[in-house]
Amino acid sequence: MLSALALLRRIDAGDLSPQGVLDLCRAAIAAHEPEIGALVHLDDAARAGTRAGPLAGIPLGVKDIIDVAGLPTGMGSPLYDGNVARADAAVVAMARRAGAIPLAKTTTTPFAYLDPTATRNPAAPGCTPGGSSSGSAAAVAAGMLPLALGTQTGGSVIRPAAFCGTAAIKPSARLLPTVGVKCFSWTLDTVGVFGATVADVAHALAALARRPGLALPGGDPLTTFTGLRLGVLTQDFAGDPEPEAAAALDEAARAAERAGARVVRLQAPPLWAEAWRLHGTIQDFEAAQALAFEWDAHRDALPPLLRGLLDEAQSVDAPSYDEARRTVHRAREAGRALFAEVDAILTPAAPGPAPRGLGATGSSAFNRLWTLTGDPCVAVPGCRTADGRPVGVQTISRFGRDEKALAAGSFVAAALAARR
């Protein structure tokens, strides 16, 4: 994979020009894209400018539900063939201000739901790359792009990162703007970032959010964040993890403890389980409105899983939705005491490694609660199954403490690397 921070250091040292970085990405795309199918549009007119900034000269992939001025936004659907954005989404505009170069639009499942794309997983051939941010995860994992934007409504950033073996962050809700992003659920939709390492996504998030304090300090994370308090949580309410995911969680916890972290086992508050079960109520009620035009005018042209969801979503009533939101608010408050005991939670990023085949995108069961509560989540690479498939863990901190989730993710990644 291409590390954004490594590329920035080479630019600063004069070893590589911004145009050279673009050429490097274009060469990687030419070599790998025919096999992976992670991109829907490549901007042949993109050039490295003279703009300074924390991401100056770094090419960026943008999920194809996010507008980039002058480029098509296809939503993963033939319904939007020929739809060219006239303005950048707010997060893309911020990326440009930071010096990044939007180079490619990446594949998305139709309207960011569950009907899969044809994108292939470069880290686990024959397996799904996950969804709905399939192309963003796969493009970074294949070394075609150093950074890419995705979105998460259930598990669409963290899950594909885990399946493809990249780092990623689903930040605190509303930390990054969703203006110019096709809405599925205005309460849940969250823009996230994929990169090669936790430090890369921390640097990118700091630049996009104009919060320099989110960038991780240099040096060894095992020294910088020694004494970190980690709480291990299995998320029983989401079902049992597969043996490979349980083994990865145990491996990450033991590595972190050996590296100096204080590791404790946590029990989830009962309200978390109740809130987790209500994710669909909130998502579906809002999706029925956000996609009202598509369902009213083009129902028969929608892909089957999305059409079925929207058909059922019409019956979700406002009182059920309002009560679900109240329950989630109480669950968020119930988590405050737990987060007071630890700096971050360590838990599986997905039920297991990427499932074989391209007919489905995998389950978001281990991601939904944190999207509901708006807490920041970091996908931590470093574990693999016996047959070589990536299997992910994630670090989670309470809402608004993204720097803690990133610090914990960086520490766990370094601890996993050190065990070798």
Image (tube, rainbow, N blue to C red):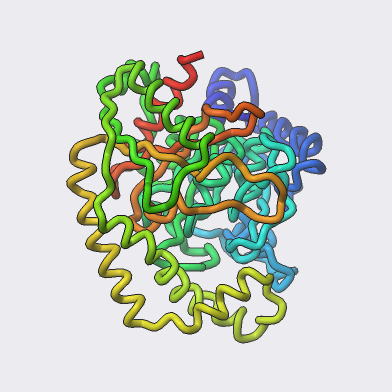
Q: Is residue 129 above or below residue 86?
A: above
Residue shown at 44% from the left, 35% from the top: 203
Residue 135 is situated, as x and y percent measured from the top left of the image, at 65, 48
Q: Is residue 140 above or below residue 175?
A: above
Which residue reaches farthest bottom? 296
Report if residue 99 is visible in the image.
no
Residue shown at 43% from the left, 42% from the top: 205
Q: Is residue 38 left or right of residue 97?
A: right
Q: Nearer the viewer, residue 370 or 140?
A: 370
Q: Is residue 196 left or right of residue 250?
A: right
Residue 189 is situated, as x and y percent measured from the top left of the image, at 45, 61
Residue shown at 54% from the left, 40% from the top: 162
Q: Nearer the viewer, residue 384 or 117?
A: 384
Q: Nearer the viewer, residue 35 or 354?
A: 354
Total numbered labels? 0
In what quadrant of the picture does the N terminus appear? top right
Q: Is residue 305 above or below residue 128?
A: below
In the rendered image, which quarter is residue 266 located in?
top left
Report if residue 190 is visible in the image.
yes
In the rendered image, which quarter is residue 324 located in?
bottom left
Residue 415 is situated, as x and y percent measured from the top left of the image, at 42, 20
In the rendered image, which quarter is residue 30 located in?
top right
Residue 246 is situated, as x and y percent measured from the top left of the image, at 46, 35
